[in-house]
Amino acid sequence: MSRALDLAEPVFSASGSPYSPRYDEVYRDGAAGLQRARHVFLAGTGLPQAWGGRDQFVILEAGFGLGLNFLATWQAWRDDPRRCRRLHFVSVETHPFTSEGLAAVHASLDALAEFAPLAAELRAAWPLALPGLHRLEFEGGAVALTLAFGDIDAVLPRLVLGADAFYLDGFSPARNPDMWQPQLMKRLARLARPEATLATHVADSVFQRGLQAAGFAVSSVPGFGSEPPMTVARFPVMRGTRRQPPPPAAAWPERHAIVVGAGLAGCAVTERLAARGWRVTLFDAHDGPAQLTSAHRAAASGGGHAPGWQAAACCRPAPARRTPGSSRRPSPPWAFPRRSRAG
């Protein structure tokens, strides 16, 4: 996963639509693209009703493309008074645009004016086109977009999350057959929470049989506009009794965490938890952060770190352990107990 990405380029068809020479197919764009996103993916997965009143909702998308599905979902979340408290949108993209490329294709979409402020926020936060996970947060952290840049066959086995809905928006099976293989459907099923929903514009029979073999209950329903039928699916509750089920939505009666060690990793965990409203107690034997190995200037480069693949907020963390013999409760979020000195 450390190899360079094969990036998408801002190329346009004769009609002016964003176009992929690699797959010889246009991206779904314009007003029709946004309406299609609402019909196929939001309505196809039961949104926005499905997230109503929930603390957390997780969507896993295959094929970020121009970001229209994410923007339509984000706008639907903003417009819904019964929206979930926190929306996680995880999207796998094998051929991402650079920030300049994304800006170029967005500039060509007149219909994107409906989402202009959201699209501008997305472009401003767009990461470098490097393999691995890139986490972007919006709405004060209530909407989290995790971009997984890399080949989907390599990414899915390494993701750790529980998905409530799936958007499958790759190029057609005739142009991109690897995206629709039965083995990939099994990898999606591994991440599906009970009653997870799935939607896609594809209704290929081989693809649907692969979904069924992976445990999904599959149906064909009318597609968008004049398009052929599309596929919707649900992962039944009875399929939830698996040897390694995905983690359920996290729930803590008290949002208090103890972090031991104030190196780079401990401080990063503490900052993220505090940003999400947690009360954090951080213990370290020294008087301040990053006093040992983490203080080395080479540690700041991050050059030796492999890309992370755990969408942390979608997972159930291990319970924090109380430090043996410790009864003090320093003031959160930072605490650096001094070592006792003789005399």
Image (tube, rainbow, N blue to C red):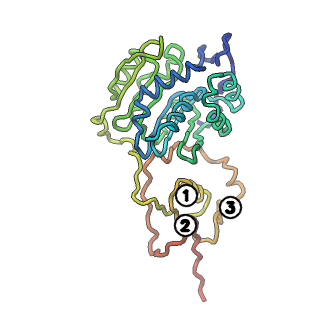
Quadrant (top left, top right, bottom left, bottom right) of the N terminus: top right
Q: Position of residue 223 (x, y in %)?
A: 44, 16
**Badge 1 is on which residue?**
274
**Badge 3 is on which residue?**
295
Task: Give the residue type at disc 2.
Answer: Pro
Q: Position of residue 127 (x, y in %)?
A: 65, 38
Mark 2 vs 1: CB contact within 8 A: yes
**Badge 2 is on which residue?**
332
- Secondary element at image label 2: loop
Between discs 3 and 2, the one toward the N terminus: 3
Quadrant (top left, top right, bottom left, bottom right) of the C terminus: bottom right
Looking at the rendered image, the disc whose residue lies closer to the viewer, 1 or 3, is 1
Depth check: give the residue in front, 199 or 300. Answer: 199
Q: Position of residue 244 (x, y in %)?
A: 36, 42
Looking at the rendered image, the disc whose residue lies closer to the viewer, 3 or 2, is 2
Q: Residues within 10 Å of mark 1 (few under 14, many from 20)?
A: some
